[in-house]
Image (spheres, rainbow, N blue to C red):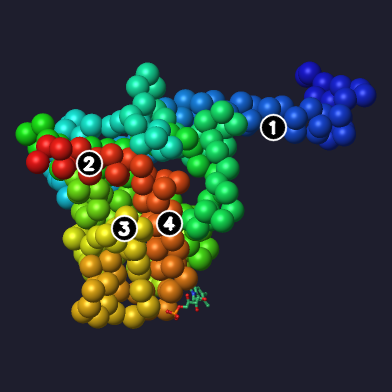
Amino acid sequence: MPDAKKPGFSRDSISNTLIVAVGVSLVCSVLVSSAAIVLRPLQEANQNEFRQRIVLEVAGLYDPAVPVDEQFGNIETRLVDLETGEYVDGMDPQSFDPEAAANDPQLGVTIPKERDIAGISRRAVYAPVYIVKEDGAPRQYILPVRGKGLWSTLYGYLSVEPDGNTVSGLRFYEHAETPGLGDQIEKEPWLAQWPGKKLYDEQGNPQIEVIRGSVQSGPNEIHQVDGLSGATLTANGVTYLIRYWIGSHGFGPYLAQVSSEANDNG
Ligand SMILES: Cc1cc2nc3c(=O)[nH]c(=O)nc-3n(C[C@H](O)[C@H](O)[C@H](O)COP(=O)(O)O)c2cc1C
């Protein structure tokens, strides 16, 4: 009969307990890290597909029966230098991450306080734009926008017609505003008001506004969208973030450029 208990060996000793605990932690951490590394490309692909779907939705082109990447093939993605409004070549617009770039010393800039009406502190020097074409001619320019709501940063896409002034659509795809209050920004009855609204006045100043209450007929109605009842602070966030991104520190120079192109092309 083998001796089950070796003299001097105790399974419950402190050193054995520690060895087992450290061993189990090491195995678990290797498993978790490996899973994170293995799953990262899949997560990125899913995130990419999700954003492409939202771009298609804001363009009014999304068809659930057709794979997203196939539909997205008809949309041209370019990078824009926000200061000049010119396209940037030599960088891959698909893999450019504007939020990571915002915090990069070379690729990001601090937004001067008095101009930071979106409350985002920094932005990248470049931004991706998505151009929807029909028979080779641009029909919509889809711009990523973001800014503070009440509780969270609101992330969305604004689609603009080739005149650089008329809204074609708006969608928010990420935020943490309150369900039933601030989350009305992602609901159709409210979003349906946006197409046709004008971003700028005759002098080119951003005028678009989510007002308090309902839009009344008058000279400003073309720039106005109904307020969100019980969620005026989120609604104000939407006004300011859009005004920032269409302003001279955002896509203003780019939108001026596309509208003059549209004028040149008749
Ligand atoms: C629990 C809680 C959650 C709220 N969430 C939001 C929100 O997501 N967005 C918002 O603008 N206001 C929210 N509010 C209300 C704001 O505090 C504020 O009263 C409201 O924005 C004012 O809008 P009103 O003038 O249309 O009522 C919340 C209030 C409470 C108590």
The numbered mark, 1 or 4, whose residue comes first in the sequence reads: 1
Q: Nearer the viewer, mark 3 or mark 4?
A: 3
Could you tell whether 42 is left or right of 29 in the image?
Answer: left
Q: Which mark is residue 25?
A: 1
**Which residue does the numbered mark 2 point to in the structure image?**
260
Look at discs 2 and 4 and give the one toward the viewer: 2
Q: Nearer the viewer, mark 3 or mark 1?
A: 3
Q: CA distance from mark 2 to mark 4?
A: 24 Å
Q: Amino acid at mark 3?
A: Gln
Q: Amino acid at mark 1?
A: Ser
Mark 2 or 4, nearer chain start: 4
**Quarter the N terminus occupies:** top right
User: What residue type is disc 4 on?
Assistant: Leu
Q: Residue at x 30, y 51 (%)?
A: 158
Q: Position of residue 234 (x, y in %)?
A: 44, 67
Q: CA distance from mark 1 to mark 4?
A: 45 Å
Q: Which residue is mark 3?
A: 203
- Find numbered disc 4 in the image and state the secondary structure of the residue it sits on: helix
Question: Which type of secondary structure does the marked residue at label 2 adopt?
Answer: helix
Viewer can see residue 219: yes
Count residues near mark 3 (Cα–Cα under 10 Å), then give few for <14, some for 14-19, many for 20+.
Answer: few
- Kindly check if marks 1 and 4 are in contact, taking CB atoms under 8 A apart as contact: no
Separation of marks 3 and 1 at Cα, in angstroms = 64 Å
Give the class, few, some or many, for how many residues have Cα within 10 Å of label 2's Cα (few <14, many ≥20): some
The amino acid type of the residue labelled 2 equals Ser
Is residue 212 positioned above or below 182 on the image?
A: below
User: Earlier along the polypeptide chain: callout 3 or callout 4?
Assistant: 3
Say which residue label 4 marks.
Answer: 241
Residue 58 appears in the rendering? no
Mark carried by residue 7: none
User: Which residue is found at the position 52% from the left and 63% from the top?
Assistant: 151
Of marks 2 and 3, which one's residue comes earlier in the chain? 3
